[in-house]
Image (spheres, grey):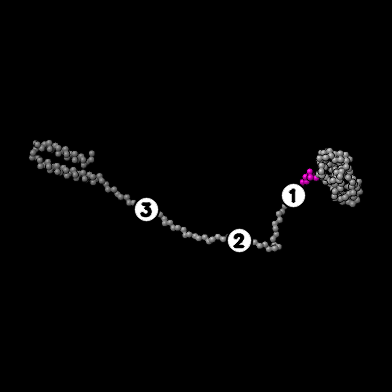
Amino acid sequence: MKPAFKNIFTLLLIVIIISACGSKVATAQPDVDTLLTAAVGTMVYSYFDTQTAIYTAETATPASTPTLLPTFTPLPSVTLPPSSPTYVYFTPTLGTFTPAVPTVTGTLPTATVNPGALGYGCSNLAFIRDVNMPAGSVLQRNEEVTKTWKVQNTGSCIWTFQYRLVFLSGDDLKASGDYIQKQVIVWDWAEVSIQFNAPKKPGTYTSYWRMVDANGNMFGATLILSFVVSE
């Protein structure tokens, strides 16, 4: 219980006791009024004094100082000059321009002949090997020679007795080609030859020959004869 209310309760209790005894002590009435007046004054004073003691003035907190934002300054506007294309003209001087020529390095590929394109009609021939006198063989001057190749019938018809070798190009050795003197069926092989005398003049000689059918039409691979006549 707060002190102010406790004092008021005590005063009221005293007033009640005095009022109960009033009938017995008549001469004390003025003193009771005086006491009541003093009690009420004391009560009021005590109440307001207590409230004053209880109330504590709050200290006002000063408002925080607002932070000012930086002032925004707009960037100056920039006006770009209008773009215009630039043309570069090149006029070569006559006699001074040299075109670039690509340089080829390495081994160039060798064209491969399609054997099927060498045929004539149904006749065709493929070279198998040199039976004798491989390229670079050495002969004596005026030596009597028989050169032989092994060939295959790669056509679609049979070679007849009239098929033989004929001179195509190169060094003309005045040679004669032999008739095959037999029939050669498709995919079978045969040996064909020529006879000649080695030249009297020393040196290297190369001669090219082909097969012909009964009507003299050349066909098949070219057969090469290459040799050296010694001193």
Amino acid of disc 2: Tyr
- Determine if the magenta segment contains residue 115: yes
Q: Nearer the viewer, mark 2 or mark 1?
A: 2
Chain part drawn in magenta: 111-118
Image quadrant in which the N terminus is located: top left
Which is nearer the N-term, disc 2 or disc 1? 2
Q: Residues within 10 Å of mark 2 (few under 14, many from 20)?
A: few
Q: Are marks 3 and 2 in contact (CB under 8 Å)?
A: no
Residue 106 forms part of the magenta stretch: no
In this picture, is 123 found above or below 74? above
- The span from disc 3 to disc 2 (Cα, nearest Å) is 61 Å
**Are there few (<14), some (14-19), or many (20+) residues within 10 Å of tag 3?**
few
Residue type at numbered disc 3: Pro
Q: Could you say which disc has been placed on residue 87 in the image?
A: 2
Q: Residue at x 37, y 53 (%)?
A: 66
Viewer-nearest of labels 1 and 3?
A: 1
Q: Mark 3 vs mark 2: give the one in front.
A: 2
Identify the mark nearer the N-term, 1 or 3.
Answer: 3
Judge left or right: residue 84 versus residue 35.
right
Name the residue: 62% across, 61% down. Answer: 88
Circle 2 SS class: loop
Q: Which residue is mark 1?
A: 108
**Residue under label 3:** 66
Q: Looking at the image, can residue 70 be seen?
A: yes
Q: Quadrant of residue 123?
A: top right
- Give the structural element (helix, strand or loop) at label 3: loop
Q: Is residue 128 visible?
A: no
Query: Based on the displayed image, in which of its 4 quarters is residue 154 positioned?
Result: top right
Which mark is first along the chain, 2 or 3? Answer: 3
- Left or right: 69 in relation to 136: left
Give x and y (percent) for residue 46: 20, 44
Q: Tell me what residue is drawn at x 55 percent, y 60 percent.
A: 83
